[in-house]
Amino acid sequence: MSGYLAVFVVVLIFVVIFQIAKASEYVSILKGEKKTRQQTNRVNGFLLIVFLVLGLVGVYYCNDLLKGKIILEASSEQGRGIDQMIMTTLIITGIVFVITQILLFWFAFKYQEKEGRQAFYFPHNNKLELIWTVIPAIALTILVAFGLRHWFRITSDAPKDAMVVEITGKQFNWLIRYPGKDGQLGRKFFKNINDVNNPVGQDWEDELNKDDYMATEMHLVVNKPVKLIIGSRDVIHDVGLSHFRMKMDAVPGIPTTLWFTPDVTTAQMKEKTGNPDFVYEISCDQMCGAGHYSMKANIVVETQAEYDAWAAKQVAQYAVAHPAPAAPAAPTAAPAPAKDSAQKVVAVNEAKH
Ligand SMILES: [Cu+2]
């Protein structure tokens, strides 16, 4: 029933619109077409000014409402440079935006059709065209040069003391590999990949692989440059590090790199944001399939001492893939001459280990 009613209402609305259009057509014939056109132009001119004012107020309001709310200050040295670049770009394009919008709507209002006013025929002016081509070209070249400077910086060779971390995307999570004590990542081969104990396909023949370990979250040392070696096991993913203002595609078969220096620890960020649950996040910034939304990992930025303590606890993936053969069962010893039962439990536990 409500379906029929909806169709009826829609038809009715069309009929009303048609009737209004028909009526205004008769009115314009009665009044004379020119007069009606001028009247419509006046209304349009006025509405354009209203649109301009509401639009600019809206732009200001939206920006003011979200100021400082959605974007935290960058947590890397390079990220702050990128923020500065974006700010400069926004200021320049913002000024141009406001000026051009005011001119556009104001001119439409001011130079509307009027009795006795004639349009000026102005087909071509080389000087004017040169000005409005060269000035934006120079401005945009400067902005692009700024961007390239940052791009070349983060994709250039990392400093010698940089730590190296490998991150591999797969549907749908991130695999993080550390090079271990030798500081060098071992060789990989895609046919070695298995999800039981070799998720990135390490080649166990390579000695460099013996100490590489996999981690579930990325640990970084504050104020120490880190070079990420980025790859993918299946489709194109993208390592998105919004807090550090870094982002790089993870392409199967083509390793990509970037480096940056995190300079605010996770603990400092918890204090700064007043959020005890704050974590630096790695997101996937490339739509990569049904589980794309869940492709998230955490980064912990900590002091060198904290990092060393964490690293010391990690187990090499080689050891995970090659568990030592079970030790022969210890001969059952005579019951320990323990005085009380608590001591006995400890002794049994020790024997087990
Ligand atoms: Cu992805």
Image (tube, helix red, strand yellow):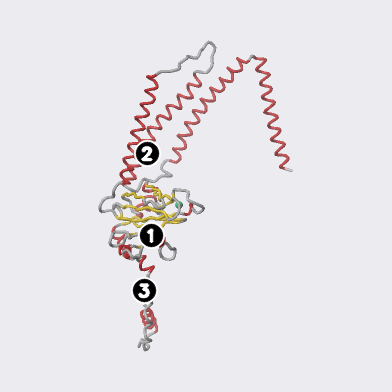
* Label 1 crowd (10 A; few <14 / some 14-19 / many >=20): few
Above or below, comparing residue 350 to residue 135 in the picture: below
Q: Marks 2 and 1, Cα distance to the nearest angstrom?
A: 40 Å
Q: Nearer the viewer, mark 2 or mark 1?
A: 1
Disc 3 target residue: 324
Q: Which residue is drawn at the image coordinates 39% and 51% (left, top)?
A: 274
Disc 1 target residue: 189
Disc 2 target residue: 86
Residue 31 relative to residue 167: left or right: right
Q: Which mark sits nearer the N-terminus, 2 or 1?
A: 2
Q: Which mark sits nearer the N-terminus, 3 or 1?
A: 1
Type of the residue with mark 1: Phe
The picture quadrant where one finds residue 42 is top right
Above or below, comparing residue 12 to residue 218 in the picture: above
The picture quadrant where one finds residue 315 is bottom left
Which element type, helix, strand or loop, lies under badge 1? loop
Q: Quadrant of the N terminus?
A: top right
Mark 3 C-beta to ligand 1 under 8 Å: no
Q: Nearer the viewer, residue 203 or 196?
A: 203
Which element type, helix, strand or loop, lies under badge 3? loop
Residue extending furthest toward the left: 160
* Label 2 crowd (10 A; few <14 / some 14-19 / many >=20): some
Residue 119 relative to residue 149: left or right: right
Above or below, comparing residue 50 to residue 77 in the picture: above
Q: Nearer the viewer, mark 3 or mark 1?
A: 1
Q: Marks 2 and 3, Cα distance to the nearest angstrom?
A: 54 Å
The picture quadrant where one finds residue 353 is bottom left
Type of the residue with mark 2: Ile
Q: Nearer the viewer, residue 98 or 206?
A: 206
Q: Which mark sits nearer the N-terminus, 2 or 3?
A: 2
Which element type, helix, strand or loop, lies under badge 2? helix
